Amino acid sequence: SHFFHDLISSQVGYIITKEGKGNINTAWLESLPVLEEMQYIKHVRISDSLEVKIDGKHGKAVIKIRKRNK
């Protein structure tokens, strides 16, 4: 589709998961404050930074929470 062609040609990374695969902390995600919720998207806010590493060649990704020093 044109959407994925534009996404890939712009070098924007995207991550998909299959049910039962991967390690996603859904309890943490559900605990975050919601700014806006639509049919398929929930916009949440976190106070910490995220470090995202994507290996498109091998189809792997890691998202790490970077805690702020207080």
Image: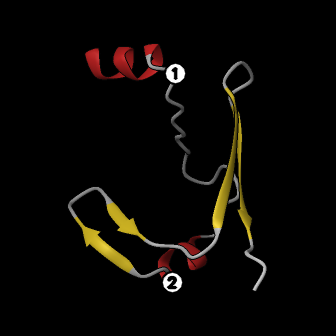
Check the image and name the residue furthest to the right. Answer: 69
Looking at the picture, tell me which residue is in the foreground, 67 or 19: 67
Observer able to see residue 43: yes
Picture quarter containing residue 35? bottom left
- The residue pinned by badge 2 equals 31
Spot occupied by residue 9 in the image (x, y as percentages of width and height): 44, 13
- The residue wearing badge 1 is 11
Q: How crowded is mark 1: few (under 14 residues within 10 Å), some or many (20 or more)?
A: few
Image mark for residue 21: none
- What colouring method underlies this structural image? secondary structure
Mark 1 secondary-structure assignment:
loop
Label 2, residues with CA under 10 Å away: few <14, some 14-19, many ≥20: few
Quadrant (top left, top right, bottom left, bottom right) of the C terminus:
bottom right
| Image side of residue 4 versus residue 56, left or right | left
* Residue drawn at (27%, 15%) of the image: 2
Q: What residue type is labelled 2?
A: Ser
The vertical placement of 24 against 1, above or below, is below
The image quadrant that residue 27 belongs to is bottom right
Q: Position of residue 69 (x, y in %)?
A: 78, 79
Quarter of the rendering occupied by the N terminus: top left
Nearest to N terminus: mark 1 or mark 2:
1
Question: Vertically, is 45 above or below 9?
Answer: below
Q: In this view, does 39 lie to the left or right of 55?
A: left
Is residue 24 something that shows in the picture?
no
The mark closer to the camera, 1 or 2, is 1
Which kind of residue does numbered mark 1 sit on?
Gln
The residue sitting at 44% across, 19% down in the picture is: 10
Whole-angstrom CA distance, mark 1 to mark 2, is: 31 Å
